[in-house]
Image (spheres, grey):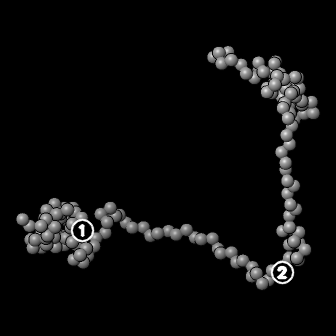
Amino acid sequence: MPDPSEWTEWQHSRLLTLWQEGLSSRLIGEQIGKSKNSVVSKVHRLGLAGRPSPILRGVERKKRQYVKRAPRIKLPDLSEVKPLPVEIVQAVVVKPAPIPVRPIWIGPIRECCWPLGDPRTKDFRFCEAATRPGKHYCATHWRVAYQPVSEFA
């Protein structure tokens, strides 16, 4: 049985004839029993003249229009720039060491932390009523902050 990748003499001569007539590689492949890619590869190996894309046939090709670039900016020569005095450079470069921040332990909260008023005014304060151990709010504000789920539904 012959190898399907082999080209017979008839397929080869028919390819050359149909290519000269201007048929597409798909149509040539259908007529000689080969795939389009096989025809294209054979044409390439034989060095036959290529054709323009079938998509662009009949369409007038437009010249490319290039966008004009912005003009180049000429930077000043660094030899013309005078260096800054050492005092100014040191003042800018040397930064004071940051002050270390230590956390301050306040202890257990014994007063209500419920905010009262607008924080942007001078009248702003916290409730400061007595709380139960381990709680942040007094009994009144505790009931407001932690309402049962059933009341929302």
Position of residue 111 relative to residue 81, above or below, is above
> Is residue 19 something one can see in this rendering?
yes
- Density class for disc 1 (Cα within 10 Å; few <14, some 14-19, many ≥20) is some
- Density class for disc 2 (Cα within 10 Å; few <14, some 14-19, many ≥20) is few
Q: Mark 2 or mark 1: which is in front?
A: 2
Quadrant (top left, top right, bottom left, bottom right) of the C terminus: top right
Horizontal and vertical percent for residue 26?
21, 61
Q: Residue 67: give its label.
A: none
Q: Residue at x 90, y 33 (%)?
A: 121
Horizontal and vertical percent for residue 23?
20, 66
User: Badge 1 is on which residue?
Assistant: 40
Q: Is residue 101 left or right of residue 7?
A: right
Residue 76 vs residue 1, the one in the foreground:
1
Looking at the image, which residue sits at the far top?
A: 151
Residue 50 vs residue 44, the one in the foreground:
44
CA gap, disc 2 and disc 1? 67 Å
Q: Residue at x 50, y 68 (%)?
A: 65
User: Badge 2 is on which residue?
Assistant: 82
Q: Secondary structure at mark 1?
A: helix
Q: Amino acid at mark 1?
A: Val
Horizontal and vertical percent for residue 120?
87, 35
